[in-house]
Amino acid sequence: MSTMDIGGSQLDASWFLILGAILFTIGAAGVLVRRNPLVILICIELMLNAVNLTLIVFSRQLQNMEGQLFALMSMTVAAAEAVVGLAILVDIFHVRDVEDVDELSEMKG
Amino acid sequence: MAIAIFFIAAAMAVAGAIGVVSFREPIRSVLSLVVVMLALAILFLLLSAQFVFVVQIIVYAGAVMVLFLFVIALFGPTRELARTRLRFQSWLSVLFVLALLGLIWAMLQGVQYRQPDKGVDLSFFGTVQAIGVGLFTTYLYPFELTSILLLVAAIGAIYLSRKRIDDL
């Protein structure tokens, strides 16, 4: 009971959800594998986008606007996260060059 | 038609996502992420989320990605070294990611889809008017809270990037 009638053709909501899952896991792989802090922030943006896709799919499948409103809220949160994350990185880059996130271990107890 | 659009956009999104993770230069990762965002914008339009489609292109692909490009342009192209501190980190993360994908897949098999709400006019669905009515009536309070969140983020960014006294 998850098919949606889009422009006359029947699309299944689970296709979109699987696409969202694939994008989310690729983003998670990037966060784990990449060393550059900037690229890790980019991968987090990718994961947030994948979640936005699932919100909008459920919004369409249930024909309920609240999913889209929540997607807009999460875009705002993502923008705030990007701004603060980039500001912290710029602040660190002023002091020294960082090639590897593991170098940033000054706050380790 | 819609099925063809879905599969083209999905292929674009997955290819872009693989590009984000695998390119060595950060600038190429950012440009791949723009491709992913445009593909997702197409899918949003397919799911009759017109306003979110426009916001995705203007705010995300436009503003946020330009912010990333600015930071990369400011600090020069830093190529990532292939070395890692932790041995087997890439293998472990591939294993973890496959397990995560399998878990999400298994979860999706058991999803019980609720019946759509009755009596929703789909010609009104996802328009600027519908979003505006939602944001300024039922969800006015969360909407105002997000504006405070953006204000806090802006103040935090200004504070973090201020000129230090010992720099002068």
Image (cartoon, coloured by chain):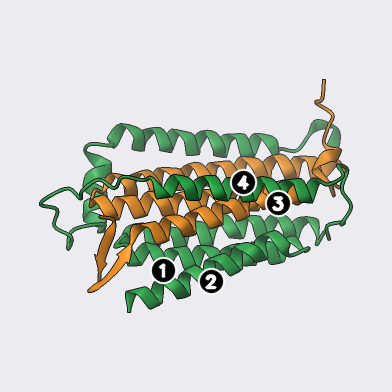
Chain colours: A orange, B green
Query: Label 1 is found on which chain of the structure?
Result: B
- B55 vs A42, nearest the viewer: A42
Mark 4 vs mark 2: give the one in front.
Answer: 4
Secondary structure under the numbered disc 1 in the rendered image: helix
Left or right side of B75 for A57? left
Mark 1 vs mark 4: give the one in front.
Answer: 4
Please name the residue shown 82% across and 20% down the image.
A109
- B130 vs A34, nearest the viewer: A34
Tell me, yes or no, if residue B168 can be seen here.
no
- B164 vs B86, nearest the viewer: B86
Q: Which residue is mark 4?
A: B99
Q: Amino acid at mark 3?
A: Val
Q: Report crowding for label 4: few under 14, some 14 to 19, many 20 or more residues within 10 A (C-alpha).
A: few
Q: Which residue is mark 2?
A: B12
Tell me, yes or no, if residue B24 can be seen here.
yes
- Distance from the alpha carbon under mark 1 to that under mark 4: 29 Å
Query: Label 2 is found on which chain of the structure?
Result: B
Q: Earlier in the sequence, mark 4 or mark 2?
A: 2
Same chain assignment for discs 1 and 2: yes
Q: Which residue is mark 3?
A: B94
Q: Amino acid at mark 4?
A: Ala
Relative to residue B64, is residue B134 depicted above or below? above
Q: Are marks 3 and 1 in contact (CB under 8 Å)?
A: no
Same chain assignment for discs 4 and 3: yes
Q: Are marks 1 and 2 in contact (CB under 8 Å)?
A: yes
- Distance from the alpha carbon under mark 3 to that under mark 1: 29 Å
Q: Looking at the rendering, which quadrant does residue B158 occupy?
A: top right
Q: Earlier in the sequence, mark 4 or mark 3?
A: 3
